[in-house]
Amino acid sequence: MTERERFHHVIRGAAVDRPPLLEEGVRDAVLEVWHEQGLPRDKTHLEVFGLTPHENVGPNLRYVSSYFGRVFDLSPREYRKAFDVSRRRFPDDWDETVKRLEDRDHIACIWASRGFFQALGVGDWPTLEQALLGTIKERAQVRALMDIYSDFCAHMLDMTLQEVDADFIYLSEPISNNDGPLISPAAFEDFMIPVYERIIATAKHHGCENILVSTYGNTTLLFPAMIDVGVTMLWISEAAELPELDYRSLRRELGPELGLIGGIPLSILRIQSTEDMRDRVEKIVAPLLRSGRYIPLAGGRVREEIPWVVYKEYRETLAEVIEAASSA
């Protein structure tokens, strides 16, 4: 069974020998440090542990860079130029990528949205302040811009799905800090849920039923609206260890039909005792694996401060817990 097949079995809630062994997106700089600490020079962590990356493909969905700092002030016509529907948004090697993905064993997803604040041109503190004030004082304008953004995202997704059979579509939503979302649930439903509706309808038109939201911080207040509109998977990264973000709590609150990726706090990689590390991994991962529709991995990027020996221990521990849960 390939990792791609495992992914579809897990997300459907079907029986599987083990979940896909996804990786955390370890960067080359970290690998350089790890090579100095004992990772074999001719290997990566992927090869050592049989991990597979998930590949994000598709067009560049960011606003045209020349509009930075003034996206929120654009007329509808100018906004359409900032988010222009064009094949130029695809990478130069797109044709080769399409051909390469036709017969693949790994998981590939398509970027479908960069999120609410990206749609309003946020790129620094002044533009964030401008956008937040706009959601209060210029609600009609924000709705109009988001309507254009939904058209842009849907058209770019349609173009992509005509050429790539995606395992899931990827909605990035960096909208929260650890205290909660930066706009209210009511405002999110007003402004962004129609965008989700349009994107999800496009995905389903092409037969793609797996809809993932990737978010950061504490976005729990927005999850019910996301799920109601058709989101089927959540992936939370770089968030504080809050009770409401514990994946076991999310499973109880949001139900067994929701797919979950991640859920292992990065603090586990800082535990000194092997026994304590195993205990925490087992308590988090084992019940989630038994509940189904769960792919375990650390909830954020593993950075240079985590030594190779610690990452190795974490991966070996996780493999043992997965094996035990799969054979139970």
Image (tube, rainbow, N blue to C red):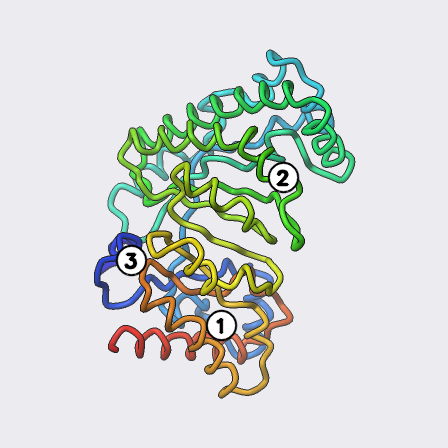
**Residue at 32% from the left image edge and 36% from the top image edge:** 164
Q: Position of residue 23 (x, y in %)?
A: 44, 62
Horizontally, residue 318 falls left or right of residue 269, namely: left
Q: Would you name the residue on which mark 2 appears?
A: 184
Q: Position of residue 143 (x, y in %)?
A: 58, 22
Q: Would you name the residue on which mark 1 appears?
A: 41
Horizontally, residue 55 falls left or right of residue 325, namely: right
**What secondary structure is found at the residue carrying circle 1?**
loop
**Residue at 48% from the left image edge and 21% from the top image edge:** 85
Contact, CB < 8 Å: mark 2 with mark 1? no
**Residue at 37% from the left image edge and 64% from the top image edge:** 21
Horizontally, residue 184 falls left or right of residue 13, namely: right
Q: Looking at the picture, which amino acid does disc 3 mark?
A: Val
**What secondary structure is found at the residue carrying circle 3?**
helix
Q: Residues within 10 Å of mark 3 (few under 14, many from 20)?
A: many
Which of the two marks, 2 or 1, is nearer to us in this view?
A: 2
Residue 51 lies in quadrant: bottom left
Q: Compute the Cα span from label 3 to label 2.
A: 33 Å
Q: Which quadrant of the rendered structure holds the N terminus? A: bottom left
Q: Position of residue 212 (x, y in %)?
A: 42, 45
Q: Residues within 10 Å of mark 2 (few under 14, many from 20)?
A: few
**What secondary structure is found at the residue carrying circle 2?**
loop
Which of the two marks, 3 or 2, is nearer to us in this view?
A: 2
Residue 320 lies in quadrant: bottom left
**Residue at 37% from the left image edge and 75% from the top image edge:** 319
Given residues 241 and 164, the one toward you in this image is 241
Q: Is 221 above or below relative to 287?
A: above
Q: Looking at the picture, which amino acid does disc 1 mark?
A: Arg
Q: Compute the Cα span from label 1 to label 3.
A: 34 Å
Q: Would you name the residue on which mark 3 appears?
A: 10
Residue occupying the far right of the picture: 126
Q: Closer to the N terminus: mark 3 or mark 2?
A: 3
